[in-house]
Amino acid sequence: MPAIRPQALLFDLDDTLWPIGPVIAQAELDLHAWLTEHAPRVATRFSIAELRERRLALLARRPELIVDLAHLRRVGLEEAFALAGEDGRHIDEAIRIFLATRNAVTPYDDVLPALERLRARWRLGTITNGNADLAQIGLAHHFEATLAAPQFGRAKPDPSIFLAGCAALGVAPEAAVYVGDDLKLDVIGAQRAGMRAVWLNRNGGRAHEELGIVPDAICATLDELEAWLHQLGVE
């Protein structure tokens, strides 16, 4: 990539700014507990694991649903409610229950201090395939632009969502850096859009070698991201 001074940084959300696995697990527990009380036929017929398996099977049948994971979950619940003979009027509240816990995330320790420093020097944005609500989480004020696949209509690694993120911040792709944890969705997607891509590798994995993917930088924390940016001569 050309050595152009970065003007903007765009971030993935889940597993980049906060761990998501335990959050989704708790959200599914909360949802199932709510179903037990308000839609018992569904809870009795389908365990959490069975609902998850049905959702994956649904996605295999209808891959277009990948662009909106909340809608995927809704359609999966609609099928489960119908099979269980349960009243579908509860589905809206079931989704609300799930999303409330899904947005109860805890940022990694490095995130809040780093975002304060980074937004003083660069324009910041986010691009996500998920349905995190930055306002509800309390991080929206750090970012000038937020793109989510459900609203945009296309998901990472489609280059168009990365290009739209750059356009929203008013910068050319070569003047933007994307930071994310997923090598295929984040690194390859951003690089194909003409951006530099930083693999945020918090666990010290070597998957990039196995996959033959070459990020522009590999960082374990946002502090290391800052150090890399300084090495580019942009402090």
Image (cartoon, rainbow, N blue to C red):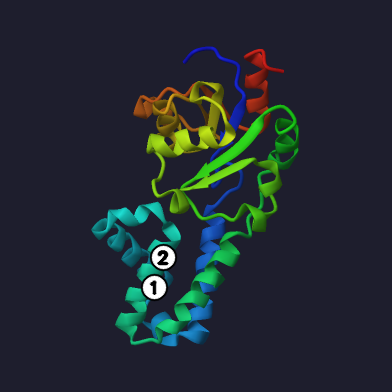
| Residue 123 found in image quarter | top right
Spatial CA span between label 1 and label 2: 6 Å
Quick one: 163 or 65, which is closer to the camera?
Answer: 163
Residue at the location (49% across, 13% down)?
A: 2
Does the residue at mark 1 contact the one at mark 2 (Cβ under 8 Å)? yes
Crowding at dot 2, Cα within 10 Å, few <14 / some 14-19 / many 20+, comes out as many
Residue 180: tell me if it is visible: no
Q: Position of residue 165 (x, y in %)?
A: 51, 37
Residue at the location (58% across, 49% down)?
A: 19
Residue at the location (67% across, 28% down)?
A: 122
Q: Position of residue 223 (x, y in %)?
A: 68, 29
Q: Position of residue 61 (x, y in %)?
A: 24, 59
Q: Which mark is residue 73?
A: 2
| Residue 202 found in image quarter | top right
Disc 1 marks a residue whose amino acid type is Leu
Q: Which residue is mark 1?
A: 77
Q: Position of residue 94 (x, y in %)?
A: 50, 75
Q: Which mark is residue 24?
A: none
